[in-house]
Amino acid sequence: MVALKTLRYVGGPRRMAGNGVSRRVLAMAAKTVTIRTKPTPVEFGQSISVVSNVNSWETSTATTLSWTEGDVWQGELEVPGDVNLEFKLVKMANGEVIEWEEGENKSFVVSGKGSKMLECSWGSNELTETKAARKRSSSSSSKKKKEEEDVAVESAVAVESAVAVESAVA
């Protein structure tokens, strides 16, 4: 699914079919940036979230990362197309910030096609871009399997029909 963003265009009018309204609409495909931390232990009941310029630094709309084995936290952040993403990690509990990460903001220019995966550490603004795992569509593999099953069934039916015709003729 592609998210669309409407931006105000400053410039000349554009002819549009239909209602005669002149305007420009720029559609930008949202991009997914996966944030993955190096091991970051927290106290029981706490979590790690991402606060960024994309959500206007609002902790109430921060992206909460999911805990994985080894105290590694990971989550997906939707960004509006090509953007200079700046973010910090925060420790949260019960919807409240316990601790902001110190130091400079982490910064990454999101551009080009495809998803991005960034690995970072608490307290460091260093980022490592890694190749995002390509998601396989379960629907396409299910569809292929279904097609193979259909062919197998059609073949079995054809064989049964041939045997029945042979028996009737004999």
Image (cartoon, rainbow, N blue to C red):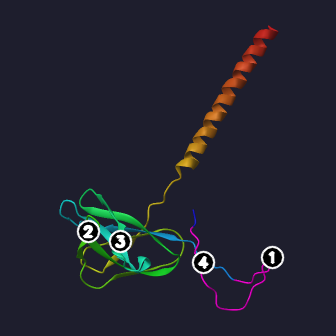
The N terminus sits in image quarter = bottom right
Mark 1–mark 4 distance (CA, rounded to whole Å)? 19 Å
The C terminus sits in image quarter = top right
Q: Earlier in the sequence, mark 4 or mark 3?
A: 4
Which mark, residue 92?
2
Which mark, residue 6?
4
Q: Secondary structure at mark 3?
A: helix
Residue at 49 percent of width and 57 percent of height? 135
Amino acid type, callout 4 = Thr
User: Considering only vertical position in the picture, is 23 above or below 89?
Assistant: below
Q: Nearer the viewer, residue 154 or 81?
A: 81
Q: Are marks 4 and 2 in contact (CB under 8 Å)?
A: no
**Residue 66 picture quarter:** bottom left
Q: Which residue is mark 1?
A: 17
Amino acid type, callout 2 = Met
Q: Are marks 2 and 1 in contact (CB under 8 Å)?
A: no
Mark 4–mark 2 distance (CA, rounded to whole Å)? 33 Å
Q: Of tags 2 and 3, which is closer to the observer?
A: 3
Amino acid type, callout 3 = Ser
How packed mark 2 is, by other alpha carbons closer than 10 Å (few <14, some 14-19, many 20 or more), is many
Amino acid type, callout 1 = Ala
Q: Nearer the viewer, residue 77 or 135?
A: 77
Q: Earlier in the sequence, mark 4 or mark 2?
A: 4
Q: Which residue is mark 3?
A: 60
Q: Are marks 2 and 3 in contact (CB under 8 Å)?
A: no
- Answer left or right for 75 relative to 20: left
Q: Secondary structure at mark 4?
A: loop
Q: Secondary structure at mark 2?
A: strand
| Residue 32 on image: x %, y % | 47, 68
Q: Of tags 4 and 3, which is closer to the observer?
A: 3
Q: Are marks 1 and 4 in contact (CB under 8 Å)?
A: no
